[in-house]
């Protein structure tokens, strides 16, 4: 008899309408469409309206999910939100989401794992499902990165965009073998120097000085992060494949975090994956941190690239450093 697994049973996304093009960025900083496209693969990014916040995007993604799947918000028991751009310090974005979507019977919390946030949140959801205490969990990953991006810094401002996606996680029934098969999650706090926002927390609370020094924006040492991202994502993906007696050719679709097309290509090469096995949408949305992987899942599902029984490999790397891989057998 197969053990109870945590399975994605519904999904939806929200991408803001407003677009910031590479051509517009050329007018803001010393950059070029050519540089951005060749060094990152990014062609545009979407920006949330000023009067909206991360929980609004989650609510819109939830609406999108409800259009395609039958969902009663009152049946949701737990909401886990992966984000580094919460609406505010507290209440949690999960609490704000609960209120907006009418999930009156849910408890919930936010988790902060930067670009690996969706994988971390899915692993937490998986534990609650496998141990039998919960039956309907909403996992949301959403980022309004435009609010923490320094549009005077060409090293970072070309990279990031806004977006959100949600998945519903439920237990498998009738001995079904789909769902989360395995996951490996890692962290190395030495990464703190290379990718961070210094101010706004208890270490450097907001002050005139932190604002003057532009310490409330993302800082990234791109070259260092690039090298770690390629090796860590490829290694952890290899590890999860080997641990499950699989190789690259068994994977129907690899959905990696979308930070840089060159990172994705390098990982795919190391895993010996063919082009058609890899989901790439960075040209559309840029890097939306925790949201890239679930947005990728929604895109792949909408495009018919996910079929029931397919093996799907997810992998991410981000601030912390945090990274990991998750292996799913697709079940919808
Ligand atoms: O999602 C979380 C994890 N994040 C990542 O995985 C991102 C990892 N890093 C990267 O994707 C890449 O390192 C970047 C896209 C951020 C940068 O690409 P790179 O090929 O590593 O460029 P670089 O930082 O080594 O810079 C090369 C040159 C520099 O000029 P000099 O010093 O050679 O004269 C930069 O100043 O490119 C310059 N540069 C730019 N030029 C035009 C940096 N940003 C820009 C820009 N436009 N936007």
Image (cartoon, grey):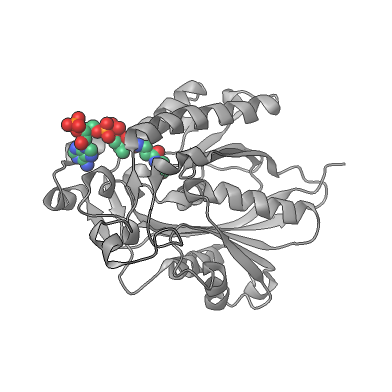
Can residue 311 be seen by looking at this rendering? Answer: yes
The percent coordinates of residue 84 (x first, y second) are 46, 57
Q: Where, quadrant-wise, is the N terminus in this rendering?
A: top right
Residue occupying the point 60% across, 53% down: 121
Residue 293 vs residue 76: left or right?
Answer: left
Residue nearer the viewer, 60 or 151: 151
Q: Residue 314 sits in which quadrant?
A: top right
Q: Nearer the viewer, residue 173 or 97?
A: 97
In the image, taking residue 73 as reference, residue 67 lies left or right, namely left
Is residue 109 shown above or below 328?
below
Above or below for 255 versus 251: below
Residue 110's x, y, as percent?
56, 62
The percent position of residue 31, horizontal first and vertical second, equals 16, 42
From the viewer's perspective, is 26 left or right of 239? left
Answer whether residue 332 is visible to the viewer in this image. Answer: no
**Residue at 41% in and 58% down:** 163
Where residue 282 sits in the image (x, y, percent)? Answer: 36, 43
Left or right relative to 36: residue 187:
right
Image quadrant where residue 78 sits: bottom right
Residue 307 placement: quadrant? top right
Q: Where on the image, by quarter, is ligand 1?
A: top left
Q: Is residue 52 shown above or below 161?
A: below
């Amino acid at each position: 008899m197969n053990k109870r697994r945590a399975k994605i049973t519904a999904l939806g996304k929200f991408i803001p309408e407003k677009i910031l093009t590479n051509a517009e960025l050329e007018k803001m900083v010393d950059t070029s469409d050519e540089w951005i496209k060749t060094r990152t693969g990014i062609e545009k990014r979407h920006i949330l309206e000023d009067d909206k916040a991360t929980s609004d995007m989650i609510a819109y993604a939830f609406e999108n999910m409800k259009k395609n799947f039958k969902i009663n918000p009152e049946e949701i028991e737990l909401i886990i939100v992966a984000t580094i751009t919460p609406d505010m310090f507290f209440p949690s974005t999960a609490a704000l989401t609960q209120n907006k979507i009418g999930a009156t019977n849910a408890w919930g919390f936010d988790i902060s794992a930067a670009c690996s946030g969706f994988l971390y949140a899915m692993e937490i959801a998986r534990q609650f499902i496998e141990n039998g205490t919960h039956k309907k969990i909403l996992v949301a990953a959403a980022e309004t990165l435009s609010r923490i991006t320094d549009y005077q810094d060409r090293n970072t401002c070309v990279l990031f965009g806004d977006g959100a996606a949600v998945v519903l996680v439920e237990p498998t029934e009738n001995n079904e073998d789909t769902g989360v098969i395995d996951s490996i999650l890692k962290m190395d706090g030495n990464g703190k120097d290379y990718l961070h926002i210094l101010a706004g927390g208890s270490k450097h609370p907001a002050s005139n000085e932190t604002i003057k020094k532009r310490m409330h924006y993302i800082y990234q040492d791109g070259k260092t992060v690039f090298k770690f991202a390629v090796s860590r994502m490829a290694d952890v993906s290899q590890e999860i494949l080997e641990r499950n007696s699989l190789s690259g050719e068994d994977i129907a679709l690899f959905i990696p975090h979308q930070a840089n097309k060159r990172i994705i290509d390098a990982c795919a090469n190391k895993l010996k994956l063919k082009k058609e096995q890899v989901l790439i949408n960075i040209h559309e949305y840029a890097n939306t941190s925790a949201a890239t992987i679930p947005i990728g899942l929604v895109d792949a599902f909408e495009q018919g690239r996910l079929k029931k029984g397919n093996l799907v490999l997810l992998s991410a790397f981000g601030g912390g450093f945090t990274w990991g891989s998750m292996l799913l057998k697709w079940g919808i």
